[in-house]
Image: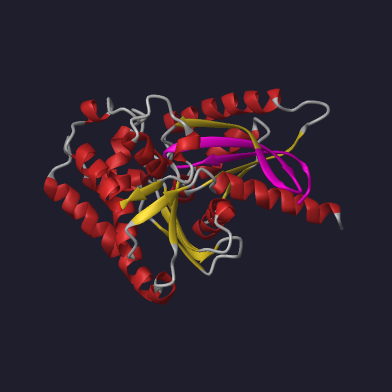
Amino acid sequence: MRCGRYAAIDIGTVTCRMLVVDADESGLHELTREYAITNLGEGVDATGELKPEAIDRVVRAIDGFLAVRDSLSTPNHPVVRTVAVATSAARDARNAADFAARLRERGIELSVIPGSREAALSFSGASIDFSGERLMVVDVGGGSTEVVMGTGGAEPLCAHSFNVGCRRVTEKFLASDPPAPEELAQARAWIREQMASWFADQAKEAALLERVVAVAGTATTVVSIRERMETYDSSRVHKARVSRQDLLEVYEHLAALPLSERMQVVGLDPKRAPVMVAGLLILLEVLDFAGIDAFTVSETDILHGITLAVSHEACEKSCL
């Protein structure tokens, strides 16, 4: 690993986030993380294009992130590299190049990464705290869900990126407010259909699992709702255990509420409320396929995976 200060930006279908870390021989040391719900993937599943207003929302968020990054880049400790990746919404959109051009104007070269790379980076970040354990890491995003199995601290043994995400499912199935029982049943059946074949192929590996680790907003929000957090506390969320019963109770509560009331639930970011029910459905299905009745939430995720990869890459280049 090459020591230095790095910034990683993850532009997802629903959220946009930045992590700034110092990397040294002992690992990654977080300086700040920034977060905004920008809904880049709004309507992409139906139209195949990013909306101009969605691109504008992300660009405004990135401008704010870069101001924070620059405030942390000092002569003695400059940010040596900034890496930005985009995932499902940008993969699916015909006009992703237009979006990338907007970021290039700001000095950011965007990488639209395939689902396989997204899965590997999520596993790398999420498994930091679970070295040596047989893990399944699940990352429920807005447009896709990545599921990765392997041993913590090692390369993944198997991974898959499903085109099943909380915004995609919401736009496909959950038109009523609150969602109608038949809509929820159709959504759940579709999620199961998309995932069943891969999980069947990985049955032997799944039988060896010791832990399911869930990353990203759906998983972290379950804890903040359960604990009724008026102010989000990552120290209480990281490594929290969520039983399937806890997950089911949060799902049943939110699914019964109209959006206006869901947005008032303590611990739930109002901007996440429209897609939260679908995210919980996906998590329930993954747990059932895994045959494990609980998951551990991790605040280390793809952002940490990106910074690990970049710092190691910088080290390799410097040693040539």
Figure disc tally: 0
Q: Position of residue 21 (x, y in %)?
A: 67, 38
Q: Position of residue 312 (x, y in %)?
A: 73, 53
56 drawn magenta: no
Compare residues 74 and 12 and report the one nearer the observer.
74
Q: Position of residue 217 (x, y in %)?
A: 42, 40
Q: Is residue 244 left or right of residue 89?
A: left
Compare residues 191 and 233 and report the one nearer the observer.
233
Q: Is residue 136 above or below residue 168?
A: below
Q: Is residue 275 left or right of residue 297?
A: left
Residue at x 41% of width, y 76% of height: 204
Residue at x 17% of width, y 41% of height: 179
Q: Main secondary structure of the magenta part?
A: strand
Compare residues 57 and 164 and report the one nearer the observer.
164
Residue at x 59% of width, y 53% of height: 128
- Please state the extent of the stretch shown in magenta in the rendering: 1-29
Residue 177 location, quadrant? top left
Q: Is residue 77 above or below residue 297?
A: above
